Image (cartoon, helix red, strand yellow):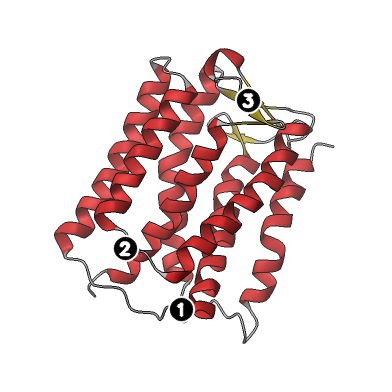
Amino acid sequence: MTYTYALLLLSIVFFPLLLAHTRQFSFAGEWRRFAWVCIVLLLFFIPWDVAAHSIGHWWFNPEYTLPYTAIGLPLEEWGFFTAVSFSMLFLYVQLRRLSGAGAAYPPVSSRQYCLYYTAVLALAVILPALALLHVSYTALVVLAAVCTLCLWRVFGTADRALSAHLMLGFVFFFIYNYALTSLPVVLYGSPWILGVRMLTIPVEDSLYNGVLLILIVLTYQMECRKKV
């Protein structure tokens, strides 16, 4: 079914969107921060996605995607980063409330704020450039993970919600990515990966997911900590 990927995306956002408009799980006051998180994820991952897709790190099965593309990627792939950024940010916000973590983070200076976004944009240029130089998906995702952990070390603030957020994020990742890779919606070029799989999921995807989850939390925290 050509709308399979679209239905999977809908399944990601359906309940969070419903709950976000209830009093108990209200997302009011967070939409601006969500917009920043979404923009950062798109700027970080889409260029990498385009470059990787163009040289065959991975590609999309036309049997399960709609016949509409932007810069060579199915529209659903653009929607993926929007859907995941919203759903996982919604989860993190709710976990913070449940854990009593509070709303305040230590403020950051304008210099730190600019430095964070400069580093993210630099990675957004370096990763696709290396992909186009035929660096493997394995090497790229290890580099992305190391750099993201360094960013977390410098800018991140651990709280009681973080561990639960990462744990649940990986549970959802295995469910969703298993669907994507078992149908398969996404296929991988064997020369570019180790070939080690968790069921049908390349082991590299677990690092990719970790980078995505940390960037969501880290960007949200930076927006919360920004001096107005």
- Which is more toward the observer, 164 or 12? 164
Mark 3 closeness class: few <14, some 14–19, many ≥20 residues within 10 Å: some
Query: From the viewer's perspective, is 171 left or right of 225?
Result: right
Check residue 225 in the rendering and tell me which mark sits there, or answer none: none
**Lower position in the chain sequence, tag 2 or tag 3:** 3
SS state under label 3: strand
SS state under label 2: helix
Amino acid type, mark 2: Met
- Residue 39 visible in image: no
Q: Residue at x 37, y 58 (%)?
A: 219
**Lower position in the chain sequence, tag 1 or tag 3:** 1
Q: Residue furthest bottom?
A: 23
Q: Which residue is mark 1?
A: 29
Image spot of residue 92 (x, y percent): 51, 67
Q: Which residue is mark 3?
A: 59
The picture quadrant where one finds residue 57 is top right
Amino acid type, mark 1: Gly
**Lower position in the chain sequence, tag 1 or tag 2:** 1
Image spot of residue 51 (x, y percent): 47, 25
